[in-house]
Amino acid sequence: MTSRVVVLTGASSGIGRQAARQFAGRGDRVVLAARGKADLDKVAEECGGNALVVPADVTDADDVEAVAQAAVDRFGRIDVWVDTAAVMAYGRFEDLPREVFERTVTTDLFGPANVARAALRQFRVQGHGTLILVGSLLAHVAVPYMSSYVTAKWGMRGLARTLQQETRDARDIHVCTVAPGSVDTPIYTSAANYAGFVGRPPPPVDSAELVASRVVRVADRPRGDLSVGATNRLIEFGFNAVPPVYDALVGPLMRRGGLSRRPIEAYDGNVFGSRPRQEGGPGRFTRAQVGAAAAAVALAAGAAIRSLSRGR
């Protein structure tokens, strides 16, 4: 299916930006929404200059409805709506200011609810459409120092499952989720931070381009839930099958892999408004690097075992 009308909320950076580029590259007409117009204009240029830019905050239901109306006014319909808009906050629950916690949950849970409400209303009118909510591995497991984000993503997952049940009567309306693990996007360095150290995606880390390609694939062939991440299923298994072991390990692993050693003063990041995004960040570990390290450890372990066997 070509020349679809695709709305992307959270299109100014990260997965949303890369998905917009990939949809546009296929000939789809894209509608770009996020809080920062300057960043959206840059993405529109990357999409060929024909993208429709609609600045909007997903926490504002009227803003989201305006995005839907602008898309329909320009193109007559909405075939796909992808929501990647999210913010993040680091710190122990008791250290997070109440307003930061609540705003993060509002953006990451009520934002997708606003998007779903606007999208499904239009899909019902036209009789078809695919809604893709980009969630997280953290909608399936819990980690310390990210209580507001985990709370919101678990809630969004529950919302998506409910919407999948409620749209069973509409064969051509699909509600899908994509759950990436660690992805190299600016959300970590843009996050509110009360943990003392700059956040980073714990290894292994996938590129935003890879996750965006999976989003495009789901738009082509809708499915209920897609997990993207080399170790996602293993982590989920540990969380569900051996909770005491998982809980004993996740704190130290989060402190070493999810937080860098770069100190940072407490601040609210981009939780309450758009700020310039910093691509990259401290200590990114790609999937390839982790695989190479694991292979090296395995080889070293094998050599040690053989050496011990010869000694006997």
Image (spheres, helix red, strand yellow):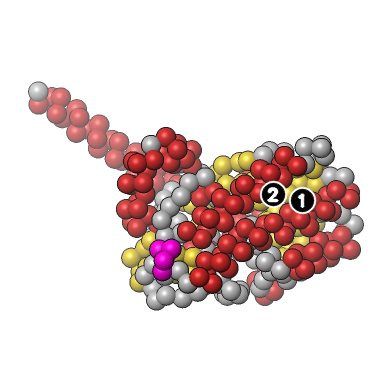
Distance (Cα) linking label 1 and label 2: 8 Å
Q: Main secondary structure of the magenta part?
A: helix
Q: Position of residue 40 (x, y in %)?
A: 69, 69
Q: Which residue is mark 2?
A: 132
**Do callouts 1 and 2 mark residues in contact (Cβ within 8 Å)?**
yes
> Which is more N-terminal, label 2 or label 1?
1
Q: What residue sits 81% from the left and 61% below the top?
A: 68
Q: What residue sits 33% from the left and 56% below the top?
A: 256
Q: Position of residue 110 (x, y in %)?
A: 65, 60
Label 2 crowd bin: few (<14), some (14–19), many (20+), radius 10 Å: many
Per the image, label 2 sits on a secondary structure element best described as strand
Where residue 164 sits, quadrant-wise, is top right
Q: Is residue 46 above or below residue 265?
A: above
Q: What residue sits 33% from the left and 65% below the top?
A: 261
Per the image, label 1 sits on a secondary structure element best described as strand
Q: Which residue is mark 1?
A: 80
Q: Is residue 32 visible?
A: yes
Q: Identify the magenta region.
A: 91-95
> Does 208 sit left or right of 216 as displayed?
left
Is residue 93 part of the magenta span, yes or no?
yes
Q: What residue sits 69% from the left and 44% below the top?
A: 162
Q: Position of residue 10 (x, y in %)?
A: 66, 62
Say which amino acid is labelled 1. Answer: Val
Location of the N terminus by quadrant is top right
Is residue 117 part of the magenta span, yes or no?
no
Q: Is residue 204 above or below residue 33?
A: above
Say which amino acid is labelled 2. Answer: Ile
> Does 171 sit left or right of 158 as displayed?
right
Q: Is residue 216 visible?
A: no
> Does 163 sit left or right of 101 as displayed?
right
**Foreground residue among 293 and 153:** 153
